[in-house]
Image (tube, rainbow, N blue to C red):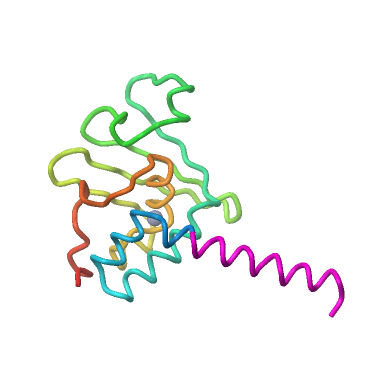
Amino acid sequence: MLEVERRVVERSFIDQKHQRREVINHPLLKELNRSYTRYAYEQMLFQYRESHKLLIKYLPKTGAKPEKMVMLKLDDLEGDTALFHIKDLETRERHQVIISMNDEGDVTCNCEFFRGINLYCEHIFAVFNRLQVKTHRKFKKLNRWTK
Ligand SMILES: [Zn+2]
């Protein structure tokens, strides 16, 4: 094997190990694994991994300061619903995620994956990552997929 190839293989092995550790230690993913069927969890795990390449824009109703938006957390959101615009830098696709802060705790995305299967999609995970969401208890259950 060429030196370059060997390094590429090593690199991807390290990335995989790192990713696996990241997933195992991620409180939200742990919960999803416990709450939902294996199939549903694996679907969401894939979506979670895809979520890191997405660009997010939060559209506050009142003018929020840019500094604050960098450290935005779920509790910082204002109003009953929060709207996010998500852009995929590779495909240039744009989607919208809406989080309701009422008792229902509805989370929706207008992408095909979410509307079809009703599991958290990469766009929703992108928003969760940004808001540092560590539990899904505040949100509506994905009833079709509970264990
Ligand atoms: Zn989506």
Residue shown at the point (40%, 31%) measured from the top left:
72
Q: Left or right: 142 with respect to 16?
A: left
Note whether 130 is above or below 139 in the view shown. above
Residue 135 % position (x, y): 28, 50
Indicate the quadrant containing the N terminus: top left, top right, bottom left or bottom right. bottom right
Question: Is 5 colored magenta in this rendering?
Answer: yes
Label total for image: 0
Q: Does the magenta stretch mainly form a helix, a strand or a loop?
A: helix
Residue at the bottom extreme of this rendering? 1
Residue drawn at (38%, 64%), measured in percent from left and top?
44
Look at the image and give the residue range highlighted in magenta.
1-21
Residue drawn where x is 23% and y is 41% of the image: 100
Residue drawn at x 42%, y 65% as measured from the top left: 45
Residue 18: quarter of image: bottom right
Residue 52, percent from left and from top: 52, 52
Residue 15 counted in the magenta span:
yes
| Picture layout, residue 58 above or below residue 99 | above
Q: Nearer the viewer, residue 143 or 138?
A: 138
Instruction: Find residue 36 and report its image quarter.
Output: bottom left
Q: Is residue 31 left or right of residue 103?
A: right
Q: Relative to 81, is 125 above or below?
A: below
